[in-house]
Amino acid sequence: MTNGSKSRQESNVVHIRASIEGEPARILLELKRRGLARSNVDAISQSLITLWEKIIARELREAQLKTSQRLEEGE
């Protein structure tokens, strides 16, 4: 299967047309001003990756706590 024949469901591309306002918009503009984000797409991509990493880290901590509690109960 070539890239051109992949269905949209199999694709890792998402098109978003949206406006943001308020604090999120202010943060985005500040990130771009500081040179930490090259574009809106770059900033949103970085944000999603950071959010994902935080969620995974939290889930890991929760799993470690549950494991620790089970070990303590077994002693």
Image: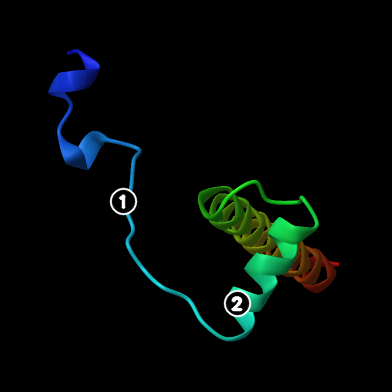
Pinpoint residue 38: horizontal percent, then vertical percent.
65, 46
**Most foreground residue, 11 or 29:** 29
- Which quarter of the figure has residue 54? bottom right
x, y percent for residue 67: 74, 62
Q: Where residue 21 appears, x then y in whole percent? A: 51, 82
Q: Quadrant of the C terminus?
A: bottom right
Residue at (66% x, 54% y) in the render: 53
Residue farthest along the front direction in this orientation: 33
Q: CA distance from mark 1 to mark 2?
A: 19 Å
Instruction: Give the number of the disc on residue 68.
Output: none
Q: Nearer the viewer, residue 68 or 17?
A: 17
Check disc 2: other Cα within 10 Å, few if <14, some if 14-19, many if 20+. few
Residue at numbered disc 2: 24
Name the side, left or right, on which 25 lies relative to 27: left
Residue sitting at 84 percent across and 70 percent down? 72
Q: Mark 2 falls on what kind of element? A: helix
Tell which circle, 1 or 2, labels the residue nearer the N-terminal end. Answer: 1
Which residue is drawn at the image coordinates 18% and 26% (left, top)?
Answer: 6
Which residue matches tag 1? 15
Q: Amino acid at mark 1?
A: His
Residue at 35% from the left image edge and 38% from the top image edge: 12
Name the quadrant containing residue 59.
bottom right
Q: Which amino acid is tagged 2?
A: Pro
